[in-house]
Image: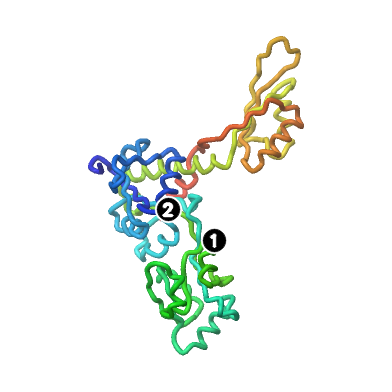
Amino acid sequence: MLKNKTVRLSIPSKGRLEETTLEFLAAAGMKVTKPNPRQYLAEIPALPELGVIFQRAGDIVASVREGSVDFGIAGIDLIEEHRGENNRILILHDALGFGRCALTLAVPEAWDQVTDIASLKTRASALNHPLRVATKFPTLTGRYLKRHNISHALIHAEGALEAAPVIGYADMISDLVSSGQTLQDNRLRPLRDGVIQKSQTALIANLEALRTRPEALDMARRLLEYIEAHLRAKDNLLVIANIRGTDPKEIAQKMFTETTVGGLQGPTISPIFTRGDDHQWYSVTVVVRRDYLTQAVGELRKIGGSGIIVSPVTYIFEEEPPRYTAMLNALKD
């Protein structure tokens, strides 16, 4: 399936992150199709040159770094942990809007005097051994503890880290936290200033591929085009209303005096041809932020709007994706 694909994208192969990645790509107009559920290869019909590879989340960053794939979708936590020192990875989009969590230091609830980094440092200095921290993120965790001059020993652990302090092979943990319920269930408590790395899912690329292969550079533009247009659209709605008025300029001026119905560059206003009505009617169309919809409807009614129709927006395309422009600037460095 990958023989005729000139560019490759790796996405997560398991669990909730695989599901949300596939849902996101489909919503952005890039539905992934896989003939056989057991296969680790797939394609995106909207981007026929692009081959899709399903990999473990931890392997995606390494694959992009080493250049065996051109693009990847992974959490910022994994990107920063595994990107290495050779600067081969470029983050194209760091806010896809899902997979939010934070790599966080957490201590046993019994350590009631330890609430922040300063008190952790005091506790660590009182131990008769280096502070033992169980983690799956030794690079980020070690760098953070060194920055705060805390003597420590990192313990690599697989599976549920929360059990490490209970079993006794670690004093505390450094782990990904979303709601914090798992920590609470295991009688652990996050330090209030112990966030090592905030994270959500991001799109990354191999820097050398972007610099040397025109097909990879073009695919980066197309991926960002779909993603940015989708993300911009999902927070907005298309609102259409009928308004009486003498001319479009008069209606536009009324709309500009309100807060939420000015549109992206301005409203689209067109005449309505009615039967036997002495009044002039116009149809106005604006894009409105989803969270301002109630206010926008009220403002349209205030200036005479009626028959208001609200529709979802699939894409909002700019002249050029801002993150594509940022990518081009980064390639010049």
Q: Nearer the viewer, residue 160 or 90?
A: 160
State if disc 1 and disc 2 touch (CB < 8 Å). no
Furthest toward the bottom, the residue is 128
**Element assignment for label 2:** helix
Residue 212 lies, in percent from the top left, at: 30, 49
Question: Is residue 14 shown to the viewer in this render?
Answer: yes
Q: Nearer the viewer, residue 188 or 273?
A: 188
Q: Residue at x 63, y 37 (%)?
A: 288
Q: Nearer the viewer, residue 301 or 254?
A: 301
Residue 239 lies, in percent from the top left, at: 63, 32
- Mark 2 or mark 1: whose residue is earlier in sequence: 2
Amino acid bearing label 1: Ser
297 on left or right of 214: right
Q: Quadrant where the C terminus lies?
A: bottom left
70 on left or right of 133: left
The numbered dot on residue 157 is: none
Residue 125 lies, in percent from the top left, at: 51, 87
Above or below 51: residue 159 = below
Q: Residue at x 44, y 48 (%)?
A: 20
Question: Is residue 332 shown to the viewer in this render?
Answer: no
Mark 2 residue crowding within 10 angstroms, few (<14) / some (14–19) / many (20+):
some
Q: CA distance from mark 2 to mark 1?
A: 16 Å
Q: Residue at x 28, y 53 (%)?
A: 68
> What residue is pinned by disc 1?
179
> What residue is pinned by disc 2?
17
Q: In which image quadrant can residue 134 be found?
A: bottom left
Q: In which image quadrant can residue 160 be found?
A: bottom left
Residue 305 lies, in percent from the top left, at: 72, 27
